[in-house]
């Protein structure tokens, strides 16, 4: 699953249907790195890679494309991977397994372009680490302290960078989580409002991070107010036990 508002559209198309054709369109018609896609010229140190995976998953899902160099001006060089740089995807997934929460889903896909596909792609190899988004489990936290990972930290994407979540970013993560479980309509049903409240309350009960719980408490209060308005109630009303 991926966040429905992922941009650019070519990235969304690729994530829904990973193929040589959709990857070709993404690489040739790209708009550079975003919250949902990262480019690496070759494989990076595993703890740094895990940090990016956590951030992308918390931000809505996406992918890391290996074999692409991005310059400071945003332009890309589709260098591809040599045979030595092209890793066994099972090894990549296994190394990450010990650094990531068990409910975080990801996989590595191989793409080798042969024949006359496009001058920039002919006979080049790429690997793509595809990272799912599951609003039931976000925000994912680091489960170890190792390399660039800090135990308990929540990482998110900010444009081309992976950062540790600020308070405002935590709110964004939770709002996206709630939105992804509900309707696109501005006028939600009472059942939808109650489901959102249950999600927020469950997240509050499960969390041990006080800063995170404080923000969840604020969101719970705002959602309760929305429900009261929906029912045309006054928050000062007395309810029977």
Image (spheres, rainbow, N blue to C red):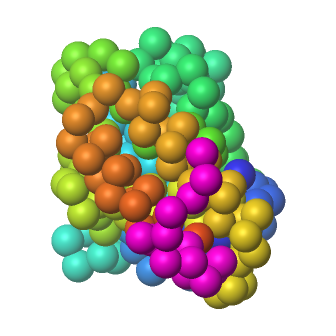
Q: Nearer the viewer, residue 84 or 162?
A: 162
Where residue 110 sits: x, y (%)? 67, 40
The stretch in magenta equals: 228-241
* Image quarter of residue 27: bottom right
112 up-or-down from 182: above or below:
above
Residue 236 located left or right of residue 23:
left
* Image quarter of residue 21: bottom right
> Quick one: quadrant of the C terminus?
top right
- Spot the residue most to the bottom: 186
**Is residue 229 rendered magenta in the image?**
yes
Q: Is residue 46 visible?
A: yes
Where residue 96 sits: x, y (%)? 47, 21
Where residue 59 sits: x, y (%)? 45, 56
Please name the residue shown 30% across and 76% down the image.
Answer: 74
Residue 57 located left or right of residue 168:
right
**Is residue 74 rendered magenta in the image?**
no
147 up-or-down from 219: above or below:
above
Q: Nearer the viewer, residue 175 or 128?
A: 175
């Amino acid at each position: 699953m991926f966040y429905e508002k992922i941009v650019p559209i070519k990235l969304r198309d690729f994530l829904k249907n990973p193929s040589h054709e959709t990857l070709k369109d993404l690489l040739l018609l790209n708009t550079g790195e975003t919250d949902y896609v990262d480019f690496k010229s070759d494989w990076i140190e595993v703890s740094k890679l895990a940090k990016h995976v956590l951030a992308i998953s918390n931000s809505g899902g996406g992918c890391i494309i290996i074999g692409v160099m991005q310059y400071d001006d945003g332009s890309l060089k589709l260098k591809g991977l040599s045979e030595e740089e092209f890793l066994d995807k099972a090894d990549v997934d296994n190394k990450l397994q010990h650094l990531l929460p068990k409910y975080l889903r990801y996989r590595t896909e191989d793409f080798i372009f042969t024949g006359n596909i496009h001058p920039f792609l002919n006979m080049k190899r790429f690997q793509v680490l595809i990272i799912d988004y599951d609003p039931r489990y976000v925000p994912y936290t680091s489960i170890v302290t190792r390399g660039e990972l800090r135990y308990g930290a929540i990482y998110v994407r900010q444009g081309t960078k992976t950062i540790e979540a600020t308070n405002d970013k935590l709110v964004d993560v939770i709002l996206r989580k709630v939105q992804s479980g509900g309707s696109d309509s501005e006028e939600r049903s009472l059942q939808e409002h109650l489901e959102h409240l249950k999600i927020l309350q469950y997240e509050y009960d499960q969390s041990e991070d006080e800063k995170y719980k404080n923000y969840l408490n604020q969101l719970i209060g705002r959602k309760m107010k929305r429900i009261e308005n929906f029912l045309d109630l006054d928050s000062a009303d007395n309810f029977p036990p």
